[in-house]
Every structure is written in C-alpha cells, then in structure tokens.
Image (cartoon, rainbow, N blue to C red):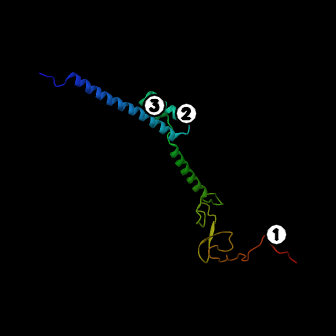
Amino acid sequence: MTPLLDLSSLHGWLLYVTAVLGAFAAALWLGLIFWTYRDARARTHDRLVHILAALLVAALNVPGVLIYLILRPPRSLEEEYQRTLEEEALLSEIEDRPVCPGCSARIRRDWQVCPVCLTKLRKPCLACGKMMELPWKVCAFCGTPVPGARSEPSLPEEAQPPIE
C-alpha cells in the first residue's frame, strides 16, 4: 500500500504556502508603510511627522498603524482648506447683510420698515414702485423726483460759481 500523501510532497506544499503567505505579509507591511506616509503627507506639511509615522509603522506593523490612526490629525489639508472656505463664505454672507440703524437687527435690503423697532428703512417710488433709500431726491430707477425734494443738483461749495 502506498500512502496518499508522500511526506516530501507535503513538505513541498507547506513550503509553497509559507512562501505565498510570507510574500503577502511583506506586501501588506510595505503597503501599510506607503499608505501611512502618503496619509501623513495629506494631513500635515511637517516632513519629520511624515518620516516618523512611516518608521512607526515599519517598526510595529499593524499596531503602528493603529497608533498612527489614533494620533493623526482628524482632517486632511484639503478638507481643512474646504472647511476654511466654507467658514469664510458664511462669515462674508453674514457680514454683507445690512443692519437696522435703529436697533442693529439684521434686515433685508428690500424691507421698508424694520420688523423689530419699526424704523423706516426705505420708501417706495410713487411712479415705479421700486424701493428707494430715504435721502434720495430722485428715483434712481425711473428718474421721478421725490415730492417735496429740491430737484436741481447741488454743486459742492468750491465748484459753485462766485456770486457777483
């Protein structure tokens, strides 16, 4: 009777499986080092941190990756830049909104009256109905003079002709 598995063929198979698993482990180890280095580059400009993170993973392998994941910055440089842009856009939107001269509440540009303190903000043009600023003497949209306002343009004092 011949045995189904010869001891030498079993040894060959074990050697083959060990070589494949060893190559896989080495590729995984190198891949983790490379990933850590690239991730550190995406999260900080400090080259020393890039190198130390890669060395940590090279020395400790999977536990090194876990330590790096705990210690790394929460956002990448690109995410931080996008967040900063969003914050600046929101702040500029808030700063661009006008405020009521009476109570400093935020108002809209097309409101006639402040809803908080009832301060008159604008007046409608009698001809076209568009909103005008209170000091305007003429509607900027249709050119209609405001009733009771002086219609001729006034010159600055130094530009006025001398009176004889």
Image position, residue 142 (x, y; %): 62, 76
Tell me how far mark 3 sits from mark 2, CA to CA: 14 Å
Judge depth for marks 1 and 2 and give the one in front: 2
Above or below, 52 relative to 85: above
Question: What residue is at 52 percent from the left and 35 percent from the top?
Answer: 50
Q: Label 3's element?
A: helix
Image position, residue 112 (x, y; %): 60, 67
The one of 96 and 50 positioned closer to us in this rendering:
50
* 3 or 1: tag closer to the N-terminus: 3
Residue 120 picture quarter:
bottom right
Circle on res. 131:
none
The residue that label 1 is drawn on is 158
Circle on res. 48:
2
* 3 or 2: tag closer to the N-terminus: 2
Residue type (three-letter) at the residue carrying disc 3: Val
Label 3 close to label 2 by CB (< 8 Å)? no
The one of 139 and 53 positioned closer to us in this rendering:
53
The residue that label 3 is drawn on is 57
* 1 or 2: tag closer to the N-terminus: 2
Residue type (three-letter) at the residue carrying disc 1: Glu
Judge depth for marks 3 and 1 and give the one in front: 3
